[in-house]
Image: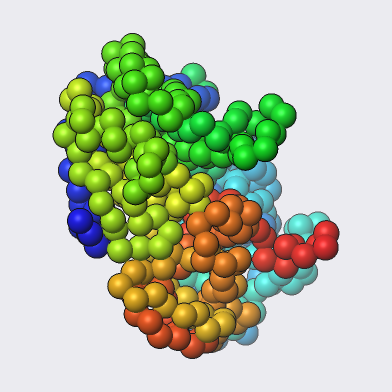
Amino acid sequence: MSRSIEEHAASVRATIARGYDAATARLELPLARARGAVLARDLLAPISLPPFTNSQMDGFAVRTADLRATGDEAFTLPVSATQAAGAPPTTLAPGTAVAVMTGAALPAGADAVVPVERVSPSSFDTDRITITRESAAGVLPGTYVRAQGSDVERGSVALSAGTVLGAAALGACAALGLDGAATVSVRQGPSVLVVTGGDEVLTAGQPLKPGAIYDANGPLLESWLEEAGASAVTTLSVTDAPDEFSRRLRAAVDGEAPHLIVTSGGISAGAFEVVRLTLEREAQMWFGHVAMQPGGPQGCGHYRGVPVVCLPGNPVSSWVSCEMFLRPALAQVWGSCVPPRWASAVLTDPVRGLTGRSQLRRGLLEAGDDAAREPAVRCVGGASSHLLMSAARASVLLRIPAGDQEFPAGTRVDILPVSGGTIIGQETANE
């Protein structure tokens, strides 16, 4: 049975929704431990930002009314005081100016700041300044003034639900006076049981035997799920023995009580597809093919009431499937990560499509040299699903439409940014 990418994405979303637990989907965390988490509730500002009206520039605070006299070629104002950052606000007497530093409170009575570069002399070591009529004409109320609450008003929404607590958001929290002990309500993703393995798979660090490979999928999926907001990830490594697989999976599910099971491998048409053979017998499952490459074999359903998403065994196929199916489902159901943010770019080189299947190629995004040049993308490595090193270098996935035709350089394609990847210009530094 075959599905489109969109049909399977909808099926995975519906599958995961049955495991959603509202009681555990939110968590109160101190800010010091909330980096990377997603806010579950709006965060209200405990103070206004800026907390007081202040100067945007090093310059002189003035009353604009003092710069509106007719007939004068220039305005000369005595400097009555100096306002340093951190000092209590002073008062501006009519017909005078106050030297004011960036971030300093605007003196009471002032309504604009003239940068020091635009007065004569251009110095703070003076007892009076002169402003030409031309310069004065551009000084309006509010010029180079940061009004109290112009960023956020006290009591209003500072950060809305769904905001990722990254560097800028955590900086905003600190500016609001919230220290690392302050608690915030964040979205908590599901607990996940990851099932990987096979008779040929060894844990990294062991001697590599003939015919064996190291397990890339376990670490890959564990890392990916943690980045996507999973609250806990447990990995179960299994063999190709059906009875052992059945027994260990049942024990793990009963012991861990996960919200979600993610398997990798064992679902194709081979003679030892232990995952498919076992779950077809013991669970309510769909197994089939999705019209994409890599990542064609897919499965989803429920095992003992727990949602199961079955991914193909090649590491790149598992990774691409996570981005195409798990990320949108976790974002929409659990809200534990940001949803995929597709964009577009033009191909730097021709790419040949496939009949009946979309390709998800790994690529590097090349930003335009100037505003007139649109972003371009070039493929990294080949299309084969075992090329994990090219996936590690990629900054985007690019979707090549189905069709046995060549898409020439300059063709616009959809791209999906992914975490990690090579920095443009550095990929050959050590070659």
> Can you say which quadrant of the picture contains the C terminus?
bottom right
* 402 displayed left or right of 204: left
* Vertical order, 193 against 100 (above or below): above
Residue 5 spot, x, y in % from top left: 28, 60
Where residue 343 sits, quadrant-wise, is bottom left
Q: Position of residue 309 (x, y in %)?
A: 30, 39
Residue at the (41%, 68%) spot, across then down: 359
Q: For this view, does 44 lie left or right of residue 171? A: left
At x 57%, y 81%, the residue is: 348
Q: How is the image coloured?
A: rainbow
Residue at screen point 46% across, 27% down: 239
Q: Nearer the viewer, residue 234 or 355?
A: 355
- Closest to the observer, 38 or 310: 310
Residue at 27% x, 22% y: name it.
Answer: 24
Quadrant that contains the N terminus: bottom left
Q: Quadrant of residue 249?
A: top left
Of 37 and 76, which appears nearest the observer?
Answer: 37
The x and y percentages for residue 275 are: 34, 34
- Residue 260 is situated, as x and y percent measured from the top left of the image, at 30, 30
Looking at the picture, does residue 77 appear above or below residue 418?
A: below
